[in-house]
Amino acid sequence: MGFSVVGSFGSLVVARSIHDRRLKCQLFSGIELNCIGFKCSKFRPLNRGVSLSKRESIEFDERKSPSEIREEIKRCYELINKLGRGVVYLGSSRMGPGHSHYLQSQELAKEIANLLDCTSWTGAGPGLMDAVIQGALQAGKPVGGFKIGKEAGEWTASNFHPYLPAETYLTCRFFSARKHGLVDAVVRNDSSDKSAVVALPGGIGTLDEVFEILALIQLQRIGSKLPVPFLLMNYDSFYSKLLHFLDDCEDWGTVSKGEVASLWKVCNSNSEALTYLAEFYSIPLSDTSKKETKLEKTHESFS
């Protein structure tokens, strides 16, 4: 059974009937009890539209069969095989060019692309994802992305990236397919493969991806024959409260002592991240990479 929502006004939700059988739902709003009646039928619409406001309407495609999801996962793998595995960056879509974390992420992506000489993968969205793309392009290295139609904080949906060539990214209908792509892009099956997961500051979507990939590493289900480094970029102590919470989880016994710390490397600066990756892959760092960057020094002077 199902129904399509036509619109909402304050606490009152208006439902358009599309079914035969009479049902009743109850909503609690404050102390007032509101009832909604709608009908059920054996027929389902091909598309459901949800009116979020007077200005915005988004159409959601139904999953007509599992084969659609499998086909999209296949396309993700084909794009990875075309562009090559590398470093996957997870991060906020809301932190724009004026934010200090945008500048730090841009420089980090540039330095890592030069260090590992690999493809930089993102969600091909705005914010810190765009910072990573800009940094990798500055380094002259390949960029790939798994885009979704609408990122958090955006009011308009688009299947197209504003400047990346169409052959370098895929707009995903299904989050499950997109996650498959982000995970497979860091798989290491040979010692010559150089990949990593870099978690930049972010919100709900970023944390969802962070902990899903972390759980796959923890359970050894990421599909990689060789270990994949995971870096948590704790710019300006952004993740410190999260780390304190995970310490509390140890005290409660929900995770083992030292378990989380063994799964990732917490980095407070770009230079710390670069040093860790260089040591992980036994790559000599240039003199300029060993030192704090000009951007980091400037950022600290304003802190």
Image (cartoon, rainbow, N blue to C red):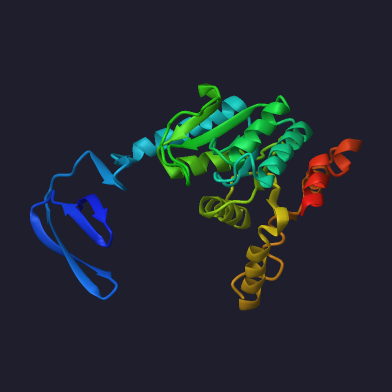
Q: Nearer the viewer, residue 159 or 1?
A: 159
Spot occupied by residue 175 in the image (x, y as percentages of width and height): 44, 44
Q: Considering only vertical position in the picture, is 232 above or below 72?
A: below
Q: Which residue lies at the image location 51% right of the left edge and 27% below the top edge? A: 162
Q: Considering only vertical position in the picture, is 212 above or below 87?
A: below
Q: Give residue 144's quadrant in the image.
A: top right
Please identify the quadrant where the N terminus is shown.
bottom left
The answer to whether residue 3 is left or right of residue 78 is left
Q: Which residue lies at the image location 48% right of the left edge and 40% below the top edge? A: 178
Q: Which residue lies at the image location 56% right of the left edge and 41% below the top edge? A: 182
The number of numbered badges drawn on the structure is 0
Spot occupied by residue 28 in the image (x, y as percentages of width and height): 26, 70
The answer to whether residue 174 is left or right of residue 268 is left
The answer to whether residue 7 is left or right of residue 150 is left
Please identify the quadrant where the C terminus is shown.
bottom right
Q: Is residue 192 visible?
A: no
Spot occupied by residue 194 in the image (x, y as percentages of width and height): 72, 37
Residue lying at the far front in this picture: please name it: 302
Residue lying at the far right in this picture: please name it: 287
Q: Give residue 88's quadrant in the image.
A: top right
Q: Is residue 13 visible?
A: yes
Q: Which residue lies at the image location 43% right of the left edge and 31% below the top edge? A: 159
Spot occupied by residue 213 in the image (x, y as percentages of width and height): 58, 51
